[in-house]
Amino acid sequence: MSILKRKKEEESTEQKIITAARKLFTQKGFDAVKTRDIAEEAGINLALLNYYFRSKEKLFEIIMGESLETFFLGFSNIVNDEKTTYTKKIEQIVSNYIDMLLKSPDTPLFVMNQVRANPKRIEAKKIFMNSYFMKQLQAGIKTGEIAPMNVVNLMLNIVSLSIFPFIGRPIFQAGEGSITDEQFIELMMERKKMIPKWIEATLKVK
């Protein structure tokens, strides 16, 4: 077997393990998942998993790091873009979160549960408060274009309006008269248009 082929097979096996671990950790949490569960999900034996990743903790740190990067890196890039208006940033943040969560619906609860256990993992407020977006909002408030407000409330509104539907999704899809997956996706597409309008309405001076 050539070195290149062996390397590709190793990368494939490693990725299978990471994919399996991500699925189980996000669905069940760290404590409920055993390394044997991950091996079975990946379709490999336990010895091979231990060869690539010597502990469940190491695997979890990789998954957690990827999840946090996915969850907040896009946010950081958007709020620090000096070429877009603050209204465009709001649209992009909402669209970014909804698109991401449609692909990875288990991510919000997973991230929130882990951040609750270890708040130092996240610096979302720091990213927001030191951003170019914040400077634009403060300038708008100073000129009277934006109504005076605690801007942390703005951040809370954007995040909660975008993310909570995914956390509450099981409620709306349980029992008689529940919405289908297709209907949920349609609702989220509608929210991508509506949330920025709702947020911008709160910014306007009466």
Image (cartoon, rainbow, N blue to C red):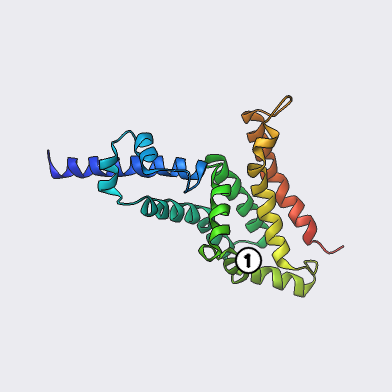
Q: Is residue 22 above or below residue 70?
A: above
- The x, y position of residue 101, in whole percent, is 57, 44
Foreground of the two, 81 or 116: 116
Residue at (50, 58) in percent of width and height: 73
- The x, y position of residue 176, in whole percent, is 73, 24
Foreground of the two, 151 or 18: 18
Left or right: 53, with 102 as reference point: left
Residue at (77, 66) in percent of width and height: 146
Q: Residue furthest top?
A: 176
Label 1: element kind? helix
Neighbour tally class for label 1: few under 14, some 14-19, many 20 plus, Cα within 10 Å: many
Q: Quadrant of the N terminus?
A: top left
Residue at (52, 42) in percent of width and height: 104
**Quarter assignment of residue 19:** top left
- The x, y position of residue 185, in whole percent, is 63, 35
Q: Which residue is mark 1?
A: 133
Foreground of the two, 4 or 78: 4
Left or right: 36, with 97 as reference point: left
Left or right: 32, with 194 as reference point: left
